[in-house]
Amino acid sequence: MLRLAVKESNALRPIVNSVGFRGFHASAPREATLKELEIRLKSIRNIEKITKTIKTVAQTKLNRAQRSMDLAKKYQTVSNEFFDEAGTQAPKDGKTLLIACSSDKGLCGGIHSSISRLIRKELVDPNVEQNTSICVLGEKVRSQLHRYYPGSLYLTFAHIGGASPSYEEALQVSSNILENANEFDRIVIVYNRFASAVSFETVMKNLYTRQSIAESPNLFAYEASSEVHQPLMEYAFTNAIFAAMAEAHCSEMSSRRNAMENASKSAGEMINKFSTIYNRQRQASITNELIDIVTGANALG
Amino acid sequence: MAFAWKKNFSYSKYASVCSQTVRQALKPEIRSDLKGSNNVEFVYAKWKNGNQEPAQTYRSADAEQQK
């Protein structure tokens, strides 16, 4: 009956297969000893503790990040005011610069992979791929995109996305990106929009270039010379990057929190399962010893 | 002489330089009230044909001081 219980728990298979090579087992796999079970139980308990800590940290950061995100979005509304009044249209095609906003850290669910999936979907058409350069904020997305489109990478940033972005950071990132941005007809930001505390949505946002500002239908309403267009575009670009980075950071915190909560829950279930098996095994070995003692006593007299 | 800086660098760089200068010009008592989020530090690298050129670090002037 114990053998049956052991076979039921597939989780114990790794203990048995830790020999290191895939052999052809002619005999049934051996049962896990009490010691091995204890070690495994202890390691799962540690994992549960770690994931719970990561979850609480992510929860605190999420609260702070949500406040920063609401403040950052106000910058965006400031620039959008002009674009709404002037009727500017963002360009839809031409030489494109894709900016992926993410971060360096993992253990956050599907944040990074959903961004690279959206970019890969966009670049499936080889004509589009020729015309596109990718700028990446964050190591995780960079390594994923490097596997698929190494030739399209243009500029990558690291050590970024660890905390909610400051405007200073957005200014520096945007000035680095804009050094060579005049050769692009169309600029797009890809980031994770914070939909709710349990979900995020990866979106692409078309930004306004200097050309599109100059071609705005209602531009005559503003008495400004044409030399304002370039700084205005750069200012709006910085605001857009700031808002996107803030929102991406917030989505990442909430996704990490959810992922770690699921991990703790699974670890808790595994602990229950293993505790039962451990206790059963312990009782069985005690019973065996008792049987030996009683048999021995009977044999003597 | 409006936009004298326009020939040499972008508006973002101009705004960044101005704000860092102002922050550094503050008296020490007031500067300690500032939040440290303005110490920006990151690493960036340009890519050419799938090869990464050597990475360069950017550290804002406030971060330099803090170190």
Image (tube, coloured by chain):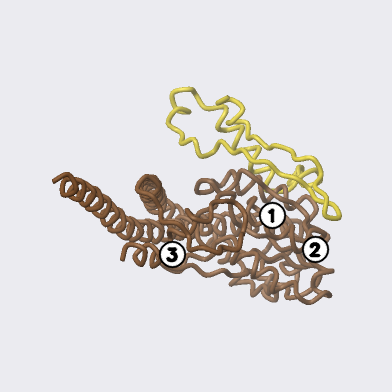
Chain colours: A brown, B yellow
Q: Is residue A41 left or right of residue B57?
A: left
Secondary structure beneath dot 1 equals: helix
Q: CA distance from mark 2 to mark 1?
A: 24 Å
Q: CA distance from mark 3 to mark 1?
A: 34 Å
Q: Tell me the amino acid under the disc marked 3.
A: Asn
The tag earlier along the polypeptide, 3 or 2, is 3
Reading the image, the residue beneath label 2 is A184
Reading the image, the residue beneath label 3 is A10
Q: Nearer the viewer, residue A81 or A255?
A: A255
- Whether residue A74 is visible, yes or no, is no
Q: Is residue A42 left or right of residue A218?
A: left
Q: Tell me the amino acid under the disc marked 2.
A: Phe
Q: Nearer the viewer, residue B27 or A177?
A: A177
In the displayed structure, B11 sits above or below A133; it is: above
Percent of width and height locating residue A103: 58, 52
Q: Chain of mark 1?
A: A
Do the residues marked 2 and 1 share a common chain?
A: yes
Reading the image, the residue beneath label 1 is A143
Q: Is residue A286 left or right of residue A71?
A: left
Do the residues marked 3 and 2 share a common chain?
A: yes
